[in-house]
Image (spheres, helix red, strand yellow):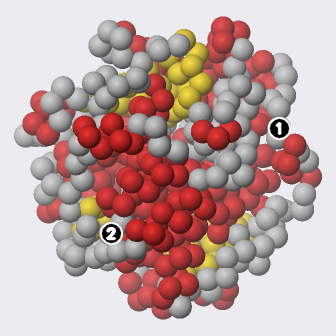
């Protein structure tokens, strides 16, 4: 399997090359030359596999330059009950990703947050850490990871990379915009290879800095800059696995279809579901849920993609989705415009204006690409996205309703998903189960849970008292040169 950029850079790179590279030299995002097709026979053979074995089967279609035995070992070391040890009452810990039915056969939660940081980001990041370690050790190289987080990516990356001798992590986060638990998870780590930078701005400011540094070819080469954000294709490939796993858990045979509702800010999680569907997984609908920062919902309703300025980005009670410029959306648009890199480069030219705080955008509503459903019927018959947004009032009401009706406590982001899922349930074909992707455990968002339910969420024993630990971080303005200097002094 070879890889190329959404903007045309075509070096025929192998997986291990793009793993370490992150962003392509032309500023685009790497994609495989094609999405590997999965046969009905393969679906039949995979249905009862343990999670680690399923991960190997799917990832081996994208990773052809790591020997099969080594890749199988990496998957086996990644997806263990010891690592995904935070299963809640009633969940089978051996499942890694349990399916929790709220209405049997009809509505369920796919529990993705049993990992070390209680967020779905662990599902891909733990694999990424082991892949980095394998490749860097094999090549005798080191790497400096530069990432941006709106809440969960940062802690998941740091827990995956902490203590690894070939890796240093420089993680940018919006100063004062995450929950207290999220901050404590990141800033309390004392490992010498972990550096936290709190940017006085929004997540989009931090994400812009990551892309600007990664686009500086000379600096990137000199300091061996890599990426763990979902701009890294390995993150997407790892997330594809749990769509297959969820499908198998929700159905009894491979003639059935399923729908997923995905809370999304940066579009990586939703895009992984799209890739799974392109590979042949019988997904009838992907429902995308946003919070008040509804850039993605606006596009799927209108055909207009309009990233917001930092001043227009809302600070919400589902902070991990406080994103107004979705990095992975470029991969989706690449397919949407007929896999034309010149068109993608043109569309993104205004978005990436030299004036970083100036947001451009594009309107496809009056172009040959205006009919979203018709366009996708050409590639994926009968398939299209649904979308919707949820507000603070919505998520509080949803948290209360889910707790009262099902006895289950959910986090604010999952509540956004539940709200939008309920809005579109009637749009699904009869008999199709709807799975909402759980994004985090409630313990990470105690203030919102307290506001909704008047009680604190349960915190796993090994994470209790985390907020009282000393915290180590640097506060910096959203300045590319300042971040470069910080990295250069410590790389």
From the viewer's perspective, is residue 64 above or below residue 153? below
Q: Residue at x 19, y 45 (%)?
A: 336
Q: Picture quarter containing residue 221?
A: bottom left
Secondary structure, mark 2, is loop
* Residue 231 in view, yes or no: no
Q: Element under label 1? A: loop
Mark 1 and mark 2 lie on one chain; the one further toward the N terminus is 2
Q: Nearer the viewer, residue 60 or 304?
A: 60
Q: 255 above or below 42?
A: above
- Residue under numbered circle 2: 64
Q: Quadrant of residue 451?
A: top right
Query: Who's the residue at 52% across and 60% down the image?
Result: 75
Q: Which residue is at 52% across, 45% downward? A: 50
The residue that label 1 is drawn on is 459
Q: Nearer the viewer, residue 225 or 203?
A: 225
Where residue 364 sits: x, y (%)?
18, 40
């Amino acid at each position: 399997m070879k890889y190329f950029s959404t903007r045309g850079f075509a070096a025929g790179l192998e997986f291990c090359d793009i793993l370490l590279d992150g962003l392509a030299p032309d500023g685009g995002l790497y994609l495989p030359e094609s999405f590997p097709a999965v046969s009905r026979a393969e679906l039949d053979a995979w249905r009862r596999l343990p999670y680690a074995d399923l991960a190997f089967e799917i990832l081996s279609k994208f990773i052809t330059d790591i020997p099969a035995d080594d890749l199988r070992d990496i998957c086996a070391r990644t997806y263990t009950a010891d690592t995904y040890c935070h299963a809640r009452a009633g969940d089978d810990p051996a499942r890694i990703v349990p399916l929790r039915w709220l209405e049997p056969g009809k509505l369920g939660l796919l529990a993705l947050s049993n990992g070390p940081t209680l967020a779905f980001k662990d599902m891909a990041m733990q694999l990424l850490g082991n892949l980095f370690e394998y490749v860097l050790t094999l090549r005798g190289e080191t790497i400096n990871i530069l990432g941006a987080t709106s809440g969960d990516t940062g802690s998941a990356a740091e827990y995956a990379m902490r203590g690894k001798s070939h890796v240093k992590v420089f993680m940018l986060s919006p100063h004062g915009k995450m929950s207290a638990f999220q901050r404590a998870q990141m800033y309390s780590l004392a490992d010498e290879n972990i550096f936290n930078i709190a940017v006085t701005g929004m997540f989009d400011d931090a994400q812009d800095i990551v892309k600007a540094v990664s686009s500086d070819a000379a600096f990137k080469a000199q300091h061996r800059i890599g990426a763990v954000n979902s701009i890294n294709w390995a993150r997407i490939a790892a997330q594809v696995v749990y769509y297959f796993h969820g499908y198998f858990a929700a159905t009894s045979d491979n003639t059935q279809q399923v729908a997923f509702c995905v809370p999304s800010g940066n579009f990586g999680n939703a895009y992984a579901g799209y890739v799974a569907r392109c590979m042949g997984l019988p997904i009838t609908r992907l429902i995308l849920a946003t919070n008040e920062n509804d850039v993605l919902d606006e596009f799927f309703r209108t055909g207009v993609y309009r990233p917001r300025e930092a001043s227009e980005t809302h600070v919400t009670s589902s902070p991990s989705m406080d994103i107004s410029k979705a990095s992975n959306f470029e991969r989706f648009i690449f397919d949407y415009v007929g896999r034309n890199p010149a068109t993608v480069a043109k569309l993104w030219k205004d978005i990436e204006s030299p004036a970083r705080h100036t947001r451009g955008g594009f309107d496809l509503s009056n172009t040959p690409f205006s009919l979203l459903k018709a366009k996708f019927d050409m590639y994926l018959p009968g398939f299209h996205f649904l979308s919707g947004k949820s507000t603070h009032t919505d998520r509080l009401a949803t948290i209360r309703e889910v707790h009262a009706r099902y006895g289950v406590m959910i986090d604010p982001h999952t509540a956004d998903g539940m709200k939008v899922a309920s809005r579109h349930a009637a749009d699904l074909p009869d008999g199709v189960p709807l799975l909402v992707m759980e994004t985090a455990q409630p313990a990470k968002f105690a203030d919102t849970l307290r506001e909704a339910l008047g009680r604190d969420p349960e915190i796993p024993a090994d994470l209790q008292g985390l907020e009282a630990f000393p915290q180590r971080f640097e506060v910096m303005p959203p300045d590319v040169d300042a971040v470069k200097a910080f990295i250069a002094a410590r790389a």
